[in-house]
Image (tube, helix red, strand yellow):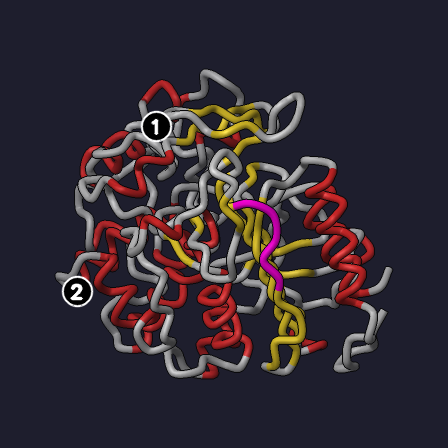
Amino acid sequence: MPAAGAPLDRNFGQRIDRVVDTAVEEQRIVGGVIMVAQRGDILYRRAFGLADREQGKATAEGTIFRLSSVTKPIVAAAAMALVETGRIALDDPVTRFIPEFRPKLSGGGQPVITVRQLLTHTAGLAYGFSQSVGNAYERAGVSDGLDQPGLSMAENLARIASVPLSCAPGTRWGYSVAMDVLGEIMAKATGAPLPDLVDRLIAQPLAMSDSAFAVRDERRLATPYADGPSGPVRMGEHHFVPFGDGLISFAPARAFDLASFPSGGTGMNGTAADVLKLLEAVRTRGGSVIRPETARTMTADAIAGIETTRPGWGWGLGFAVLRDPAVAQTPQAVGTWRWGGVYGHSWFVDPSAELTVVALTNTAIAGMAGAFPDAVRDAIYGV
């Protein structure tokens, strides 16, 4: 395992190749793109497998993927750019921008929820897929931002607000639809649609030309697949994938429906190269999109004293931050920040090694969690 700041050994690419080849041969992953950069230099890049299995279409470096939660760090960076200009503040109440959004506690109390709590997932909100089947979000018809094409933001916010908060804001961590609420705050604060804001504040300055809420070239969009009992199956029009005690509800055609609310948590599409640009910009203290002190704030653990559902990991302003590698059972260094996306993605940044890794696949959930992303990580570190 490389020491802090040490270069990767010469064999790490061969180890990644073996992991990728095995996953494709064993039909656990259909296709994907992996990029590894250290100190800003891309040391490994590979497109593998098939973007569309039924058509025999190979994955290319320029393949566009439905980013799902890889959207979160992009929107978080845009939100922090607005904080810098004073359009929003971390301690602003949500009701300053969305007066009608007033979810209550189970006892009837109506607490204040802040922008900071949305970014740190401590607002008392939730995701339907992270709860057991038949949960209150499901009964209220809340969209996690992956399904229900054509659903408006106003309607989804009303549905979210109708469900009691899981806890008093600021007291517990719970992965949630908070970034969707934040996206609407950003739009209200500026008078501009969230897709336009992200394009102006992040995508254009970083030349992320393929990243947007709309699909800019449908011919390059990867076909989504889902784990099945005998290997990945092509997703249908409305596809459910088991996840923990719940189900993730996918509607792949949502990516083409411009009437769908722009989900700040899951709604973007893009390439591995574009995601790498964003992560590198934050790693190098903001690039051209945010200030160095803002990047430091984003990548620091912002919820000291509060546990997440991932042992050893805390949370910054947009993604997980590593507290204890031994508890987390990872070779990554303290201060590493990471997350993924349920359409089949994982990424991480290890600042001590000046290392950034992006792995996008078209296979849910295997590309995001479990054997494949863990094996890619371990191959890079040589453990």
Residue 173 in view, yes or no: no
Q: Which residues are magenta?
A: 46-50
Look at label 1 and name its amino acid. Answer: Val
Look at label 2 and name its amino acid. Answer: Thr
Classify 354 as above or below 190.
below
Please say whether residue 233 is one of the residues in the magenta stretch: no
Task: Please name the residue that numbered disc 2 is placed on.
Answer: 190
**Type of secondary structure dominating the magenta stretch:** strand
262, 86: nearer the viewer: 262
Residue 348 % position (x, y)? 62, 62
Q: Secondary structure at mark 2?
A: helix
Query: For mark 1, does the 10 Å Cα neighbourhood hold few (<14), some (14 to 19), or many (20 or more) residues?
Result: many
Task: Please name the residue that numbered disc 1 is placed on.
Answer: 163
Please say whether residue 47 is one of the residues in the magenta stretch: yes
What residue is rendered at 46% in x and 49% in y?
69
Badge nearest the viewer, 1 or 2 = 2
Quarter containing the C terminus: bottom right
Classify 114 as above or below 357.
above
Question: In the rendered image, which quarter is residue 223 located in?
Answer: top left
